[in-house]
Image (cartoon, helix red, strand yellow):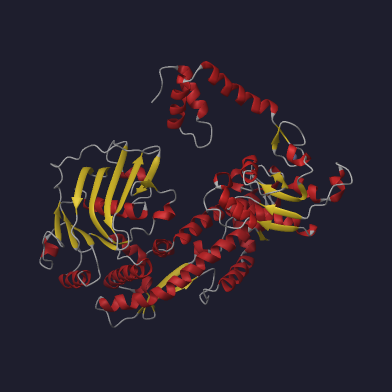
Amino acid sequence: MHFTSESVETLVEQLSKLPTIGRKTAQRLVSFILKMSSDDVRQIADALIAVKERVIFCSTCFNVTDDDPCPICLSDRRDHALICVVEEPGDVVAIERTHMYRGVYHVLGGVISPLDGIGPDDLRIRELVKRLSPSVNGESGESTTAVQEIILAVNPSVEGDTTAYYISQLLAPFHVKISRLARGIPIGSTLEFTDEATLSRAIESRVEL
Amino acid sequence: MLLHSLRLKDFRAHAASDIQFGTGMNLVCGANGIGKTNILEAIHFLSLTKSFLTSKDQYLLRHNAPFFELIGEFAGEHRKQINVRVAFVLGEGKKIFVNGSPVERKADHIGTIPTVLLSPQDYALTAGGPSERRRFINNIVCQASSSYLDDLLRYRRTLKQRNEVLYRMKRFGPGGGEDTLESWTNELVEIGTRIVSARLKFCSVFSELLTDAHVLLGDVVERPSFEYRGVGGTSLTDKPADIKAAFWSALRREKHRERHRGITLVGPHRDEITFFLDDLDLRRYASQGQHRTFGMALKLAQFQYLRNVTDETPIMLLDDVFDNLDRERIQLFIRILQNEGMGQSIITAARKEILDEFVELDAEANKLIELPMFMENKLTEVPVHTE
Ligand SMILES: [Zn+2]
């Protein structure tokens, strides 16, 4: 079905570019948008532009932030010897919601997937290795603690498993403790959509690799 | 497991059909092309979320229809009422609902409604290539264990990824991703080992059931057996440590060939199953009749296996298997189906005369379903919700 209005059709097409949004869902969103007030629509549009223009990546952990370094990397209430490695910024949000993790993060920006043309160099893996090397870690002064433990909190997909294995092999020479989130996260689901209780349990019962 | 009723809407030859089944043998008769087999296809779909004749769901749509819908009312030994509904919409795919709630993953549903299918295509099982036999084992073990299906799906994905690395290495040299190959190999071995182990466990139980079934079919002279060749060896135990070691050493042996060809050459996706009658390779030396008996024995053994592990009596689906059988064999097989504990069966045949001399028809248990019979009772439109 195509619309008589060209601008409606354009918006449907644009919204369909987003993941998990099919044409049908896009049509439903557009019908809803048409019923919203102009102010509400403008706020959405402004937020979309702002996210691209203002948001940058933290140069330490590569999480999204408005300031570099990000508040988590700056915080002295955080344990900087403990790094939790995740795939996407959304995973940081999910783990923060549990209120039980006090370390810092490292956002990979994805997982190794040859079929999608994504290799280790397309991810922030080299940057993670750098964080473990003591010489580069001196930016915030002498108080910097060397990294003692890495938690690989990647999703339990085959790509996540393989990326975790790849990283653990790469980090082996550093003699840090490396652990992986314990199973308990339902297979086939992702961290972002895992409920807090399950995620808390998975962090508590992480397994050493 | 019992199927009480089945509704088909715009599925293959059926515009709108509503069929009630008896608790014993159900004989579905009618001319060719009237949609007998489609009824079994629909039941198969409700059980295993796919047809046994095509892997493309859109082929199941009735001519020009935008969607199809299937509703089965089942009753289990443990769950008294199981309503399974499948809705397929062109361009959007299929959704499965059990008692009204959507099924998130296929693996959660497969095994709920155990079925065993006998069809003329079974000939390929004993006479065709190894992939047919791997599919047979996968089908049974999936119905018995949902983690096995998960492993299969994960294995397939890993295999694709690893093949992509090997392909890129072949094309672009080591820079094509050699640094990640070991990580993919590790994942392949981890998941592959679980699959091979599950298959070996299955084989040891299944071989006894196969012998019993062969005797039941009247063949006491020849002894059926089979051999499973997993990750390159025939002498594997189901101990994961042993399988893993064999897997790694087979991969080391094939290392250069894999790189040369740009494809994964070792793993459960290439495992072989060979059937024997006494000591003769069935595929090469058996007669038509021996193939047929062996095929039926495999299905009877599958029935027993599923009944033992799922604690449910599977529904037997027989598609046109009697049409080319002699009178004696038909009688024997019908008698087996009527044995205590065999449960419900749904049988298609072009001519009802083939069977009604052996089956006493009544409305309760053994029922004759003659097609077309549903044209007058028009279904009320059932709304389809897909999201
Ligand atoms: Zn940061």
Q: Quadrant of the C terminus of chain B?
A: top left
Q: Residue at x 54, y 44 (%)?
A: A193
Q: Residue at x 85, y 45 (%)?
A: A136
Q: Is residue B249 above or below residue B64?
A: below
Residue B95: x and y, percent?
38, 44
Residue A92 as seen in the image, left or right of residue B298: right
Residue B130: x and y, percent?
43, 64
Question: In the figure, residue B253 lies in which quadrant?
Answer: bottom right
Residue A44 as seen in the image, left or right of residue A69: left
Give B187 or B289, whichever is nearer the viewer: B187
Residue B63: x and y, percent?
27, 38
Give A131 or B175, whichever is nearer the viewer: A131
Residue B189: x and y, percent?
59, 63
Question: In the figure, residue B240 lies in which quadrant?
Answer: bottom right
- Answer yes or no: is residue B225 visible: no
Ligand 1 - quadrant of the structure image = top right
Give A12 or A78, whichever is nearer the viewer: A78
Give B71 or B199, whichever is nearer the viewer: B71
Give the farthest residue toward the bottom: B221
Q: Quadrant of the N terminus of chain B?
A: bottom left
Residue A24 as seen in the image, left or right of residue B41: right
